Image (cartoon, helix red, strand yellow):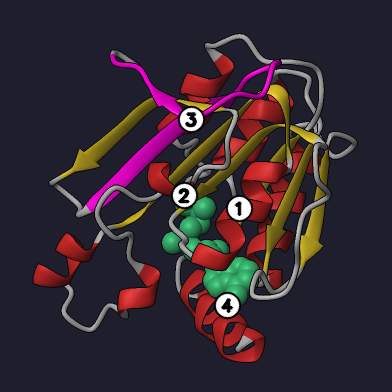
Amino acid sequence: MADTDRKRWNTKYEGSAETPFTAHPLAARALSLALPDGPMLDLASGPSGSALLVAQSGRSVLAVDVSDVALRRLAAEARRRGLAELISIEEADLDAWRPQAGAYALVLCTGYWDRALFEPAARAVVPGGLLGWEAFTLDAKRTRPSLPDKWCLADGEPASLLPDGFTVLGQTDLPENGKRRLLARLSDQPRSTSTTTGA
Ligand SMILES: C[S@@+](CC[C@H](N)C(=O)[O-])C[C@H]1O[C@@H](n2cnc3c(N)ncnc32)[C@H](O)[C@@H]1O
């Protein structure tokens, strides 16, 4: 699977001359909230503007993606901005690669969904840290019928899959693109998952 994904995404990235390096709103939102010490993990990062934004705030980042083209672009931009020492890249297949547990103040994954990755990603968050995720829902199949079900969030996901100890700061459907966005915090004192409003 990694080879197919790498080729597909390398072709896509090679076909776009300009890389916008736009940070995802979840990255900006996370940085506006209290965050414990520790690095950020950007899963399926692409040439991530979010990684650059977080590094610019002085935090180290590990960006993981299967596309060497995307990661080379990110590394080159990090060098150009003087952020190379803060951004590490790892070319890996997220079908198999798993993060170290309890190691990251912020774990972000946008534009990618693999149910088997979600729990290990949540467990990679340090107490008090944040987990941000955005992916297509099954509603997106109305306009993208070829989208495989396994790439789409089912009702209530991903919040319904959070391990105990997380509080949902916000889970929002984005009807304009068929995606759903989650931001959740792991408490310092693990307890049952609960939902609050206004995130
Ligand atoms: C829609 S892009 C999202 C990129 C970035 N997170 C963003 O929000 O713009 C999906 C990313 O997932 C990566 N990807 C796809 N399959 C993968 C796999 N099996 N392992 C690791 N990365 C993968 C692609 O290379 C691509 O960069």
Circles 2 and 3, Cβ within 8 Å, touching? The answer is no
Image quarter hosting the N terminus: bottom right
Circles 1 and 2, Cβ within 8 Å, touching? The answer is yes
In the depicted structure, whether residue 158 falls above or below residue 138 = above
Q: Amino acid at mark 1?
A: Glu
Q: Nearer the viewer, mark 1 or mark 3?
A: 3
Residue stretch rendered in magenta on the structure: 179-197
Residue that badge 1 annotates: 119
Q: Amino acid at mark 2?
A: Leu
In the depicted structure, whether residue 12 falls above or below residue 176 = below
Q: Residue 34's spot in the image, x, y percent?
A: 61, 9
Q: CA distance from mark 1 to mark 3?
A: 14 Å
Q: Nearer the viewer, mark 4 or mark 2?
A: 2
Q: CA distance from mark 1 to mark 4?
A: 27 Å
Q: Which callout, 1 or 3, points at the residue further toward the start of the chain?
A: 1
Residue that badge 3 annotates: 193
